[in-house]
Image: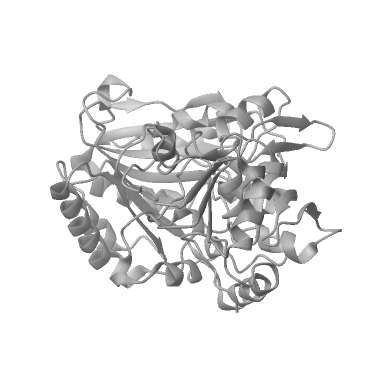
Amino acid sequence: MNALASSLIRPESEEFVERCSGWNTRIAHRPDYVVAARTPADVQEAVRFAAERSLPIRVQATGHGALDAYDGGVLIDTSGIGGVEIDSSQQCAVLGAGVRWQALLDTAQAHGLAGLAGSSPAVGVVGYALGGGAGWLARGYGLCSDMIEAAEVTTADAVQRWVSADSDPDLLWALRGGGGNFSVVTALRLRLVPLSVVHAGAIYWPMAQAREVLTAYREWLAEVPSDLGSAIAFLQYPAGAPVPEPVRGKPVVALRVCFPGGQEQAEKVLAPMRRIAGIVLDTTRSMPFSEIGSVTMDSPLHLPRIGYSESICELTDQIIAALPEVLIPGAPFIAMEMRHAAEGAARPSVGHEGMGYWDSPFLFFGMSITPDAETELAAANLGERLDAILKPSRTGTNVLTFLLHRHTPEGRGEVERVKRTYRPAHYARLAELKKQYDPDNLLGGDRNIPPA
């Protein structure tokens, strides 16, 4: 306990309560101990303390990944472990466990490089990368987890070391998409891509045109470049949201895009969708990739949220007809998105073909803000209606980082949800490695892979 004195947060302090929540305030953990780690040594001491007492370990930096609250054990908050260093010659970054995407994007931009970020720059890089990380550039460059070259870790036996393909190939393989199940990661060496400018943004129409837009989108996808990232989003930005006035407080449907090619080609690609009448706002432009968060304008505010996520085989006539009947103005959601996923120009890296992303032609996901029991119930009911629409087209898999809090289709438990984010053989290998590196199952939190 003495070794933890400087980083241990007392239960009677306000800071204890703050550290137990995060981006989704509906989730409030109730651990026995909170450790505010500022160095890898703090993490090592916290893991040793927990392992000696057989206490489960929960790790978080921003709280974006939390699926549910948990009781007891040790919560290690890694948000205080910062630092970003860019190696331009090797096109990679070394970054601490608390670094958020915006910090990495800004630093890499100055070197003409980019990380494979998701839609929200407020998300922590490490948790996102460990879970796979399927962002706007996935169809062109693959998953962020494939970019992990090495990691500084503390394993469940409280041993701290850097792991790489040379020193620990099995552990590195597990870290590339296995989440936080195999160690507490305090730093990553992450490969970057030579990209500084993309053509990105969104085109908005009134939500009443959703069926027309979805129909055109399906036809349009047959002709677009294989490295273009895109989605159709149903949006209801609050009247006070910091977004452009034409969409503030107005229900809209949007085409979201990110194209790593030139502006001239991008304009030709977008032309068929722009021919749909009724556009209320078009934000597409050539931009530094560090500004990619402007595509979705995700709120960084800490709010109570309920989510929904599914993997879909195809955009069927039934989905196109039924979604606009459910996602109507005033329905209990703030954003719902159908994203084009799976293989494009990119292919899965060798040994990681079993990641659920590669079996997900479309990813449908969204969020409801639920400040009270009434809106929580309404959001849950909306989820059930979405289940009924999407069930015939489910792939049966999902993506680990796209699993969202609360809504679990057909009542599947969290362990089963996690299992379905991998092909069976991939999951079986992860479970065997879990037995090797964490036999007492102290790690993994609510994205847990139990030992085989």
Q: Is residue 143 visible?
A: no
Horizontal side of 59 relative to 155 (left or right) equals left
Q: Quadrant of the C terminus?
A: bottom right
**Residue 170 against residue 98 in the figure, above or below:** below
Q: Is residue 7 visible?
A: yes
> Percent from the top left, x then y, of residue 217?
37, 48
Q: Nearer the viewer, residue 60 or 176?
A: 60
> Percent from the top left, x then y, of residue 185?
66, 49
Instruction: Count the marks.
Output: 0
Q: Nearer the viewer, residue 99 or 107?
A: 99
- The colour scheme applied to this rendered structure is one colour
Horizontal side of 349 relative to 132 (left or right) equals right
**Which residue is rendered at x = 43% and y = 39% of the image?**
16
Q: Nearer the viewer, residue 243 or 65?
A: 65
> Percent from the top left, x then y, of residue 322?
21, 59
Q: Where is residue 281, by image quadrant?
A: top left
**Residue 380 against residue 289 in the figure, above or below:** below
**Residue 321 against residue 259 in the figure, above or below:** below
Q: Nearer the viewer, residue 101 or 433?
A: 433
**Residue 175 against residue 211 in the figure, above or below:** below
> Percent from the top left, x then y, of residue 11?
42, 42
Horizontal side of 426 relative to 85 (left or right) equals left
